[in-house]
Amino acid sequence: MVDEHLRGKRILVVDDERELADMVAAILHGAGFACVDVAHAGAEALAAVDSRVASPERAYQLLVLDVMMPGMDGFDLLARVRERPACARVPAVFLTAKDEPYHRVSGLSLGADDYIAKPFLPQELVLRIAAVLRRCYAEESPSLELDACRVNFATAEVERADGSTVLLTAKEHEILSVLARNAGRIVTIDALCEACWGTSFGYENSLMAHIRRLREKIEANPSKPASLVTARGLGYKLVKRG
């Protein structure tokens, strides 16, 4: 069984193989998740997302996506979901037979939070989905004051000194949350990967790409960061304002 505070999280499973999609939903229901919907195509999934996006109390809180679907594959689907400001940080897990490095990197670069290869053990599926939900919905300070911006963790908005506002993706939000909880201290690359992907192996390049995009959003001069600084050979440190 999953933690009690995770049982009410709203999950959408998308897979064109109906039997598999229904099986995944049944596994999640059996583990204690109370709200699991199923879609069998990208267009159907987008319609389901859009039907809930206007009501935060009904919006999906996790997507479980197959990659190889006709018409609109999982990568395209996630990218289109991410175009919706209200869905910019919804966690996503790829569940697919395509366990190739290229597909894994493509999915993670889009902001996916995990990548589970078929065939899988039901217990592994439940544990890894629960881990993603715990990481993404951990309690945190509502806001963070940095040198060039203010970060609102509740809305995933970065309010910059020039008056503009940009949104964090789910993975950017997660990485920044980990750094914020350890503000002023070096967080090693391995520790960041473990906290944000559940393993320290194979995600260093993806972490570097997310750090680069984070700096573009929170720094006045991303090439000379004042808030998200590198501890060469060790990891990263977040420096709060003042």
Image: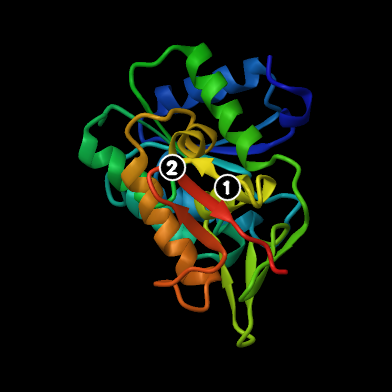
The residue drawn where x is 51% and y is 34% is: 191
Looking at the picture, which amino acid does disc 2 mark?
Leu
For the residue pair 73 and 144, the one nearer the viewer reads as 144
**Residue furthest to the front:** 232
For the residue pair 124 and 29, the one nearer the viewer reads as 124
Residue under numbered circle 1: 174
Select label 2 or label 1 by which is in front: 2
Does residue 240 appear left or right of residue 106 in this picture?
A: right
Residue under numbered circle 2: 234
Q: Is residue 122 above or below residue 176?
A: above
Q: Is residue 122 above or below residue 223?
A: above
x then y, percent, for residue 102: 21, 41
First in residue order: circle 2 vs circle 1:
1
The residue drawn where x is 34% and y is 54% is: 76
Does residue 222 appear left or right of residue 218 in this picture?
A: left
Looking at the picture, which amino acid does disc 1 mark?
Glu
Q: Is residue 122 above or below residue 137?
A: above
**Residue furthest to the bottom:** 162
**Local crowd size for mark 2, using a 10 Å CA cut-off: few (<14), some (14–19), many (≥20):** few
Q: Quadrant of the C terminus?
A: bottom right
x then y, percent, for residue 179: 60, 49
- Secondary structure found at label 2: loop
Whole-Å distance between the Cαs marked 2 and 1? Answer: 20 Å
Q: Are marks 2 and 1 in contact (CB under 8 Å)?
A: no
